[in-house]
Image (tube, rainbow, N blue to C red):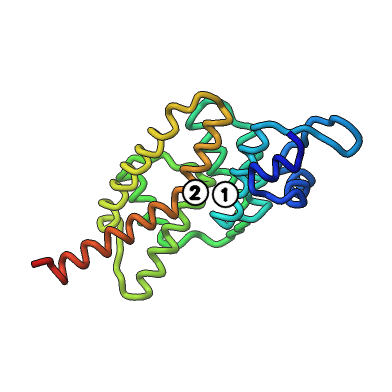
């Protein structure tokens, strides 16, 4: 298909498509003449993923490029693919820390008690420690015992995530699903949690007759 058709199919302007190609987010089309190229369904699929990451999830072009590079390096191994995607997110965050993370002891004990294997480069333990420290400053006392039920629920959600990845037929499809479940599905989980909170609060404080 021509670039005009690719634009129509994907909902992305021609100018933006050319920008994504220049930035390395989208592979160039197959040359068919002077300043002309042919595009296929893989381009449509990739463009939709790019727009979802940038427009829906609000990621930067740089972070999106890092994730797409991780996809290009992936294989059919679920663990490897997830590791590449999460690693790309961590690396693309650009966060540099020289000081030790807050509440590291509590977080390490929680990880140990859950029996989790977490890579040393992961930013998630620091994020959790910072959240606990901030809550403590507001007199909300959280420790690993309070967090254990949440950790167990998180493990169940992660198991459901992996089930969604399990039937992907091709490495590219598997990698894309890893991105979707890791990056794009997080807002959906937050929305479900908030709706559940609203429902339970209403049921407790305003029970139906």
Disc assigned to residue 131: none
- Discs 1/2, front: 1
Residue on which the image places disc 2 = 184
Q: Residue furthest bottom?
A: 138
What residue appears at the point 67 percent right and 53 percent down from the top-left corner?
61
Q: Considering only order in the chain, which callout, 2 or 1, is on the residue closer to the N terminus?
A: 1
Q: Where is residue 133 in the image (x, y as percent from the top left)?
A: 40, 67
- Vertical position of residue 39 compared to residue 151: above or below: above
What residue appears at the point 29 percent right and 56 percent down from the top-left corner?
147
Query: On the image, which quarter does residue 59 sit in?
Result: bottom right
How many numbered badges does the structure rendering display? 2
What residue appears at the point 55 percent right and 37 percent down from the top-left corner?
176
Residue on which the image places disc 1 = 52
Q: Do the residues labelled 1 and 2 touch (CB within 8 Å)?
A: yes
Q: Position of residue 65 (x, y in %)?
A: 67, 46
Please tell me whether mark 1 sits on a helix, a strand or a loop.
helix
- Residue 183 is left or right of residue 109, and the answer is right
Sort mark 1 into few (<14), some (14-19) or many (20+) by Cα contacts within 10 Å.
some
Query: On the image, which quarter does residue 159 sit in?
Result: top left
For marks 1 and 2, give the CA distance: 8 Å
């Amino acid at each position: 298909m021509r670039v005009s058709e690719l634009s129509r199919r994907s909902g992305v302007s021609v100018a933006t498509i050319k920008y994504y190609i220049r930035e390395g987010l989208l592979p160039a089309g197959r040359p068919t003449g002077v300043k002309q190229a042919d595009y296929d369904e893989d381009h449509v699929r990739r463009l939709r993923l790019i727009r979802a990451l940038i427009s829906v999830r609000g990621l930067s072009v740089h972070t999106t490029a890092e994730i797409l590079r991780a996809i290009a390096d992936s294989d059919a191994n679920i663990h490897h693919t997830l590791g590449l995607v999460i690693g790309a997110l961590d690396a693309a965050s650009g966060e540099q820390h020289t000081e030790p993370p807050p509440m590291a002891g509590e977080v390490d004990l929680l990880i140990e008690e859950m029996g989790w294997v977490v890579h040393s480069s992961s930013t998630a333990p620091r994020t959790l420690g910072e959240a606990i420290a901030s809550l403590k400053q507001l007199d909300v006392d959280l420790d690993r015992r309070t967090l254990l039920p949440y950790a167990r629920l998180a493990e169940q959600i992660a198991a459901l995530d992996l089930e969604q990845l399990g039937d992907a037929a091709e490495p590219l499809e598997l990698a894309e699903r890893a991105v979707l479940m890791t990056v794009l599905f997080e807002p959906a989980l937050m929305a479900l949690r908030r709706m559940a909170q609203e429902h339970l609060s209403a049921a407790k404080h305003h029970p139906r007759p």
